[in-house]
Image (spheres, grey):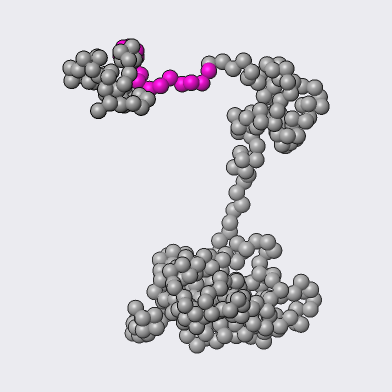
Amino acid sequence: MKYSKRLNAFTRKRLLELVQVENYSVKKACELFDVSRQTYYKWLKRNNLNDLPTKPKTFYRQTPKQLERLVIQVRDKTGLSSIKIHHELKNRGITNPSTGCFLSESAICAIFKRYKRGYKFDKLKRPKVKIIRYEKQVPGEMAHIDVKKIRKIRGDYNQKRYEAILIDDCTRLSYAAIIPDKTAQTLSNFLKEGVKYFKTNYNLKFSKLLSDNGNEFTTRYKQNLSLHLFEATLKSLGIKHKYTKPYHPQTNGKAERMWRTLDIEFYRKKWLISPEHREEELFKWIEKYNKHRVHLGIKGLTPYQKFLALTSVTAPELNQNCELAKEVVNL
């Protein structure tokens, strides 16, 4: 077999082995690799069979160290970008002695890269904001609510559809529903249904509710809260309303993480053929999430297991509830 490609470290080693170990003649071995005998003797004298670096030892146009340190000093003191430093040096008449020209923006960017400056490296040096994680100790102490637009499926007839969720902070027990819009009226009705769901299935009553500052949940005129329908609904249910920090969705992180879980484990796995089928499958999945899916945020328990552990339910009741849950989700 005749090689026509350029030699690398492996083929050079093989060329030497053919002559030294397998007793090929130099001429025959070189013909196999399509190289000259001079190439064989060249690599025979070398200790290292890898290619030598092609980088030149000296750069006649290289920026002097003194000028590089000046650029870094300007960057550290003023925080200017490469293009602004270029114009600052140009206005002061500072040139590169090696070329007799002004430092270009690309040359300054290369200096930044060598000295680890610029936005890419400054971003790594910024102190990370410490995230304060919390979890309520009593079921029903606080709930999270959020709403999100979902993608359309066959049967929606070019109409927007939204999904709302209500989550217990302590146990992660959840309730979700598909709603036609995200007005205060619709969210108020969803809240009433959610409160009824938790009361009927888990005998759970919320004392606080955390939401964002959207128009469907509150009004920016805090002195007129009683005039907002959702706020009035909370007051009638005896629930205190708490708000997230503006432009900080991570404050309502449990609800945001639930959206991701729904997207990965429900919408990407299910083939939904109609709005009615979507609502039916969503109800089944929520029951499975509450009673059978382990949750790493609560040490590998299911939300229902944690709820039972905190409410001291007896073993026969636990087995009965588990059998009922299996029937619901068709496991």
Residue beneath the point at 36% across and 81% down:
330
Q: Position of residue 1 (x, y in %)?
A: 25, 28
Q: Residue furthest left?
A: 23
Q: Position of residue 271 (x, y in %)?
A: 44, 73
Residue beneath the point at 30% across and 26% down:
3
Q: Position of residue 104 (x, y in %)?
A: 70, 28
**Can you say whether 127 is above or below 246 in the image?**
above
Q: Position of residue 233 (x, y in %)?
A: 67, 84
**Can you say whether 97 is above or below 91 in the image?**
above
* Residue 199 covered by magenta stretch: no
Q: Residue furthest right?
A: 91
Given residues 167 and 8, the one toward you in this image is: 8
Residue 19 is left or right of residue 148, and the answer is left
Q: Main secondary structure of the magenta part?
A: loop
Residue 23 is left or right of residue 294, and the answer is left
Question: Which quadrant would the C terminus be assigned to in this image?
Answer: bottom left
- Residue 254 appears in view: no
Q: Which residues are magenta?
A: 41-56
Q: How many marks?
A: 0
Residue 323: image quadrant is bottom left
Given residues 22 and 288, the one toward you in this image is: 22
Residue beneath the point at 74% across and 81% down:
228
- Residue 40 appears in view: yes
Residue 263 is left or right of residue 181, and the answer is left
* Residue 44 covered by magenta stretch: yes
